[in-house]
Image (cartoon, rainbow, N blue to C red):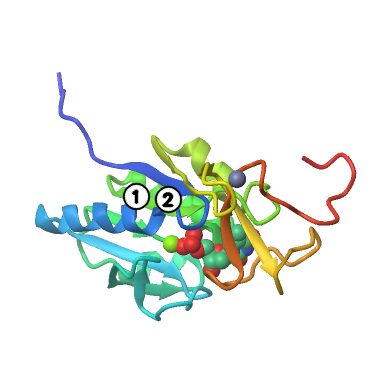
Amino acid sequence: MDLQVKDGWIEVIAGSMYAGKTEELLRRVRRIHYAKKTVLIFKPNIDNRYSNNEVVSHDNGRIQSNDIRNANEIYNYFGSVMPYAVAIDEVQFFGEEVIDVCETLADKGVRVIVAGLDKNFRGEPFGVMPELLARAEFVTKLDAICQVCGAPATRTQRMINGEPAHYDDPIIKVGAKEQYEARCRHCHIVLGKPNGKK
Ligand code: TMP
Ligand code: MG
Ligand code: ZN
């Protein structure tokens, strides 16, 4: 009987902005480096807030990454052997194709580590995240600190000229401290939310 444990699974690191998602992703990547195993790092090239070709956390932790537009481009970075792990930051910005890529890699024995916002500024599930969270073997949900009341923050408040953003604002708007705050459920405000929307 073959009782050998096989590698290959999906890990999701989710939470609001400023919860330390990228820090946690980088921590896992560094441990893989210490173990002298290979890891390829990717992020969508929509997010050039702090740097191109680097994953950068709000605390300025940084590591070399490959900026790609479509998750299928990940396959182009493989040589003759598969890497031990693939890490993707800001995964919420990828299209549906990222689900198939993560599943395929995990099936082939790759440890897939992805980090992303579980909710958009409206407080609703962000893009592909619900699907990834459901399919993952391991989920880590991190919280930040509410900038209004100090409670654990699970949501991201978008501010426009000092006012809460309107529900109809575009979902994608790259930014940091100048337009986003971490907030708890009770301090999170969305203007113009349609009746009956939770
Ligand atoms: P972070 O999770 O690493 O802090 O980065 C989240 C990025 O997502 C940041 O560039 C702002 C962006 N963002 C949106 O595009 N739409 C949203 O609704 C929210 C909350 C964030
Ligand atoms: Mg981040
Ligand atoms: Zn609060």
Instruction: Single out the residue that lies furthest toward the right.
Output: 195
The x and y percentages for residue 145 are 48, 49
Residue 81: x percent and y percent?
A: 20, 60
Residue extending farthest to the front is 149
Residue pictured at 90% horizontal, 44% vertical: 195
Are there few (<14), some (14-19), or many (20+) residues within 10 Å of tag 1?
many
Residue in view at x 53 percent, y 41 percent: 151
Q: How many marks?
A: 2
Pointer 2 with pointer 1, Cβ within 8 A: yes
**Farthest bottom residue?**
52
In this picture, is 130 found above or below 49? above
Depth check: 183 or 64 in front? 183
Relative image position of residue 24 (x, y in whole percent): 32, 52
**Where residue 38 is drawn, which disc sits there?**
none
Residue 121 visible at all: yes
- Pointer 1 residue: 112
Q: Is residue 15 left or right of residue 126?
A: left
Is residue 90 visible in this depiction of the protein?
no
Q: Amino acid at mark 1?
A: Val
- Depth check, front residue: 132 or 54: 54
29 left or right of 182 in image? left
| Ligand 2 - quadrant of the structure image | bottom left
Mark 2 CB within 8 Å of ligand 2: no
Does 38 sit above or below residue 173? above
Secondary element under disc 2, as helix, strand or loop, is: helix
| Residue at 66% from the left image edge and 63% from the top image edge | 158
Q: Amino acid at mark 2?
A: Cys
Residue at 52% of width from left, 46% of height from top?
Answer: 150
- Secondary structure type for disc 1: strand
Q: Which residue is mark 2?
A: 102
Q: Nearer the viewer, residue 53 or 37?
A: 53
